[in-house]
Image (cartoon, rainbow, N blue to C red):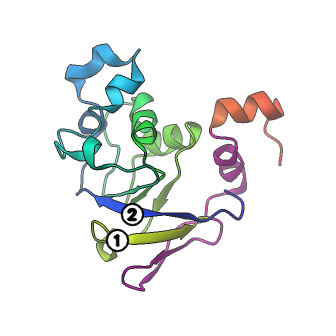
Amino acid sequence: MAGKAIKGKTLKLGDNISTDLITPGRYAHLRSNLPELAKHVLEDADPEFAAKVQPGDILVAGRNFGLGSSREHAPVVIKMSGINAILVKSVARIFFRNAINQGMPVLICDTDKIAAGDEVEINPDKGIIVNTTTGAVLSCGKIPPLMSAILDEGGLISYIQKHGDFVL
């Protein structure tokens, strides 16, 4: 993410978006067909979510995002749907690490200041989010250098294939 701004239009959800809401259990049989599973991403939170996503959109949610079981495919199908980053008030640790490992940035900020449809620009290295629709400037946690390097490579597997080890 070094020096890269992330820009996009926001799609907004509420609090307590669990991994079961992200990838409903009734679609567990699709885990080996992730493009098909991505067609159902977040449909229990918003039945039209997958249809609304445009490439480069940014998902905004409240507290407790990604709580529940460790479903590594949850951040994968969010990414496959076209989402470019996730902004939340708080996130489950396991979801956060799974997301980073899959190349999906997750940043913590005051999402009350972002509405659905707002355009935002995120600078993950500086820890700043600018809501270009309203002019609001929000702070968020900076992405640590190693995690930024993993995101730059598109995820942990790509990082290890390229570098062979954790080097900075």
| Neighbour tally class for label 1: few under 14, some 14-19, many 20 plus, Cα within 10 Å | some
User: Is 139 inside the magenta-drawn segment?
Assistant: yes
Residue 89 appears in the rendering: no
Span of residues in magenta: 125-154
Quarter where residue 160 is shown = top right
Location of the N terminus by quadrant is bottom right
Q: Amino acid under label 1?
A: Asp
Residue 98 appears in the rendering: yes
* Residue under the image location 31 percent in, 58 percent down: 11
Q: Which of marks 1 and 2 is nearer the N terminus?
A: 2
Left or right? Give the position of 78 relative to 117: right
Front in this rendered view, residue 90 or 9 = 9
Q: Looking at the image, is 88 positioned above or below residue 78?
A: below
User: Is 52 inside the magenta-drawn segment?
Assistant: no
* Residue under the image location 24 percent in, 56 percent down: 15
List the residue tagged with mark 1: 118
Q: Looking at the image, is 5 positioned above or below residue 34?
A: below
Q: Seen from this angle, which residue lies furthest bottom?
A: 135
- Please state the horizontal and vertical placement of residue 2, each as a whole percent of the image: 72, 60
Q: Amino acid under label 2?
A: Lys
* Residue under the image location 23 percent in, 29 percent down: 24
List the residue tagged with mark 2: 9
